[in-house]
Image: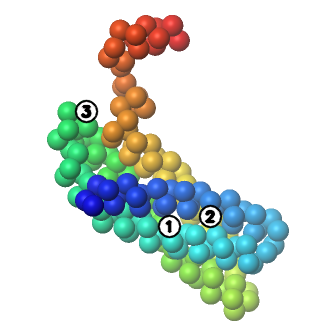
Amino acid sequence: MTDAHYHLVVNHFPIIGTILGLGILIAGLLLKNNTVKNVSYVLFIIAAIFAAFSMGTGEGAEEMVEDMPTVGKQIIHEHEEMAEKLALVLYVLGVVSLLGLYTNIKNHSKAKLVSYLVLVIAFVGVFLAQQVGTSGGEIRHTEIRKDYKASTPEAQENKDED
């Protein structure tokens, strides 16, 4: 398998893991249940690890597709820039989640504060994840690009009817 294959395998988990982790963390905060919060922390840590794998395979994937006629270097560059921001946020989220796990296990007085800090970072992560996912999808799915124009007469006719 190539880096492009590996990238496609691992790049979804940072996005999905962060979204799921945020939902689980909110449930844990509402239920005041440390076990549920710990599950979200573990998901955030795993998402950070997968973000590192995604970043590691992204360059090889870029080399394989950047010269394809419908792709182009600019759209990949935009995706890469957004992905770097997301990766940094997820690395911080992973580290703070480790702290959250520790404070919950030790019943530390700052555990609640850490959980709210994780919540804020996770919201930022989900916002960036949406942008990264969309920009990544636009690389090969030209139909979701803002500047998409249907190329077939039938597609153009259907677009004109909308």
Instruction: In the displayed orientation, state which residue is furthest to the left.
Output: 67
Q: Which residue is mark 3?
A: 70
User: Would residue 117 be visible to someone looking at this image?
Assistant: no
**Quick one: label 3 or label 2, which is nearer the N terminus?**
2
The residues tagged by marks 3 and 2 sit, at their Cα atoms, a distance apart of: 35 Å
Task: Tell me the SS state at disc 3.
Answer: loop
Amino acid at pointer 2: Gly
Q: Position of residue 27 (x, y in %)?
A: 76, 63
Vertical relation: 87 (above or below) 76: below
Q: What residue do we see at 75% from left, 78% from top?
A: 34
Q: What residue do we see at 82% from left, 68% from top?
A: 31
Q: Position of residue 60 (x, y in %)?
A: 23, 58
**Quick one: label 3 or label 1, which is nearer the N terminus?**
1
> Circles 3 and 2: CB distance less than 8 Å?
no
Q: What residue do we see at 17% from left, 41% from top?
A: 67
> Circles 2 and 1: CB distance less than 8 Å?
yes
> Circles 3 and 1: CB distance less than 8 Å?
no
Vertical relation: 155 (above or below) 117: above
Amino acid at pointer 3: Thr
Q: Which residue is mark 1?
A: 47
**Quick one: label 2 or label 1, which is nearer the N terminus?**
2
Q: Position of residue 15 (x, y in %)?
A: 50, 56
The residues tagged by marks 2 and 1 sit, at their Cα atoms, a distance apart of: 9 Å
User: Would residue 92 be visible to someone looking at this image?
Assistant: yes
